[in-house]
């Protein structure tokens, strides 16, 4: 029988861009039951519902390191480049990111407009 803390989520994570909602069981950098894992960002984590292994988890989302909004880890909403960034902040500051990140953004389905100074004539 599962203990009460495993059955009861701490809260419900809601992405402020796509409105994804998911119950989370931990918020922080070192999920319980996974002593060898330290996340690179404060994350909202849920136990993996697809496995009975209680040490397995899924990262649901985090806060954008620029604006602070809650965003899921979906490619339509955020990216991780040393820190979590929501796509609106990335688009507003695209020149601050390496060329590889800029190329990755162009491949995504999200409409991305380059600054007028970088558009080819």
Image (spheres, rainbow, N blue to C red):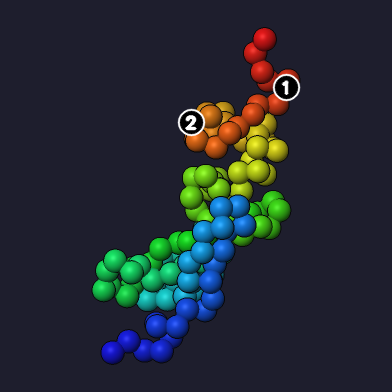
Residue farthest toward the left in the current orientation of the protein: 52
Q: Quadrant of the N terminus?
A: bottom left
Labels 2 and 1: the sequence-earlier one: 2
Q: Nearer the viewer, residue 26 or 75?
A: 75
In screen coordinates, is 27 left or right of 94?
A: left
Position of 66 compared to 61: left or right?
A: right
Q: Tell me if residue 13 comes above or below residue 89 in the rendering.
A: below
Distance between the alpha carbons at the discs numbered 2 and 1: 19 Å
The label shown at residue 106 is: none
Residue 115 vs residue 37: left or right? right
Q: Which residue is mark 1?
A: 116
In the rendered image, residue 87, in percent from the top left (x then y), is placed at 61, 44
The residue located at (41%, 89%) in the rendering is 4
- Count all numbered tags in the image, as a single digit: 2
**Residue at x-position 33% and y-position 69%:** 49
Q: Quadrant of residue 102?
A: top right
Give the label on residue 107, or none.
2
* Nearer to us in this view, 111 or 58: 111
Q: Dot 2 lies on which element?
A: helix
Question: Residue 63 occupies which quadrant of the picture?
Answer: bottom right
Residue at horizontal 52%, vertical 79%?
10
Residue 36 shows in the view: no
Picture residue at 56% right of the left edge, 53% below the top: 18
Instruction: Categorize mark 1 by other alpha carbons within 10 Å: few (<14), some (14-19), many (20+).
Output: few
**Residue 111 horizontal/vertical position (percent):** 58, 33
């Amino acid at each position: 029988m599962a203990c009460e803390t495993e059955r009861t989520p701490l809260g419900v994570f809601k992405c402020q861009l796509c409105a994804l909602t998911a119950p989370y069981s931990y918020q922080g950098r070192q999920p319980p039951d996974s002593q060898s894992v330290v996340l690179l960002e404060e994350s909202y984590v849920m136990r993996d519902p697809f496995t009975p292994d209680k040490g397995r988890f899924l990262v649901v989302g985090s806060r954008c390191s620029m604006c602070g909004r809650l965003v899921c880890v979906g490619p339509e909403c955020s990216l991780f480049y040393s820190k979590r960034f929501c796509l609106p902040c990335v688009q507003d500051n695209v020149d601050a990111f390496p060329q590889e990140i800029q190329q990755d953004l162009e491949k995504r389905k999200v409409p991305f407009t380059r600054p007028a100074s970088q558009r080819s004539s």
